[in-house]
Amino acid sequence: MFYPLKFDHKYIEKIWGGRKLENYREELPQGKIGESWDISAQDSEMSIAVNGKLAGKSLKELTEMYPQQILGKAIEAEEFPLLLKIIDARSQLSIQVHPDDEYAKKYPGESGKTEAWYVIDADADSYLIIGTEDCTESEFKKAVQNDQINQYVHKVKVKKGDIFFIKAGLLHAIGAGIMLAEVQQSSDTTYRVYDYGRDRELHLSKALDVIDFQLQSDKRKGLQVCGEDYDYSYYCLNDKFAVDIIKIKNKFEAEGEEDRFYILTAVAGQGKISWDSEELELKETESVLIPAYCESFKIEGDLKLMKSYVPNLEKIRKDILAVVE
């Protein structure tokens, strides 16, 4: 009964949004589209299945009706734990930070947020802000208040295919001209630090509580395992989620893993996914959810997939050690 699930796209206008998604999707609405929430169990932007017998069911309904079959035997969560977005930044986003789970519990309605980014497209000389540089909390606060924050932020130039891990507590911002896939904890909690005079609410006090001024991050290097039909690379591994990359050379055949679901996002190229007598196009920027009890399927085409999932840390570490030993 369970098969690869495709969901509708929840488009959100943002003051910094753009129109790059028009290059990938036909149904883009008018306006400055900054985000497409493609697999979401957030009440504000709930994903609805669009294919097969389960079409019309929300992701929340599916996980309530079939918790083990969708989430997996090893996933102890009351709600779907991840959120998958595509972000298109025509202009720079606010400089911001997210809390961890422990801090977020202090405030009703807030939740922790760690995330990872895959850069799908980037203009020449575009950059991300990731972390602070050589400053104390008091120096940083004064710089924010005096519009001199640039001297204390770490800028990283990016290109298509770069991957970054953004841990809760890490100051960050997406720069102008970047489109990326973002996988994160299922949370919409953001503390804005600086917003370039756009007159939106800031959250400096909370932000200063959670910013880790020693925390840094750079482009992930990954560990690649080459195969005949596809190459498999490990990039991000933490207790919230893992991110791997599958570069298909011929085909990728798999099935549900029973213990856990996973999300496959086409971050480069396009192809098709087939199972039983069914078939779906999988275009660049699109995602499918592979339920834990999914039947066997095959993906063919010239494409690169980002695989996102809640990992068994011990098992993945053993798998990685088996590769390097």
Image: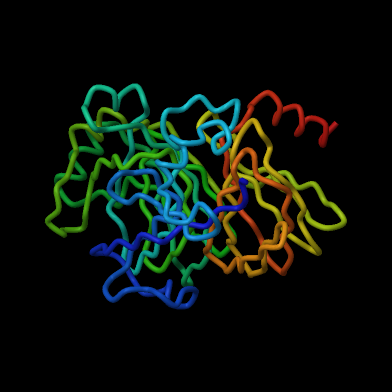
Is 318 rendered above or below residue 8?
above
Classify residue 71 by image quadrant. top right
**Looking at the picture, how far across and down is residue 231, in whole percent?**
77, 53
Residue 186 at x, y = what percent? 40, 39
Horizontal side of residue 56 vs 6, given as left or right? left
Residue 265 against residue 43 in the figure, above or below: below
Picture quarter with the C terminus: top right
Which color mode does the image show?
rainbow
Query: Which residue sits at x=39%, y=55%?
Result: 37
The one of 305 and 234 positioned closer to us in this rendering: 305
In the rendered image, residue 70, in percent from the top left (x then y), is placed at 55, 38
Residue 30 percent coordinates (x, y) = 28, 76
- Picture quadrant where residue 96 is located: top left
Residue at 26% from the left image edge and 62% from the top image edge: 14
Q: Give left or right: position of 323 versus 4.
A: right
Q: Nearer the viewer, residue 196 or 56?
A: 56
Write the residue at 30% across / 44% down: 43
The residue shown at (52%, 57%) is: 6
Nearer the observer, 98 or 151: 98
User: Farthest residue toward the left?
Assistant: 199
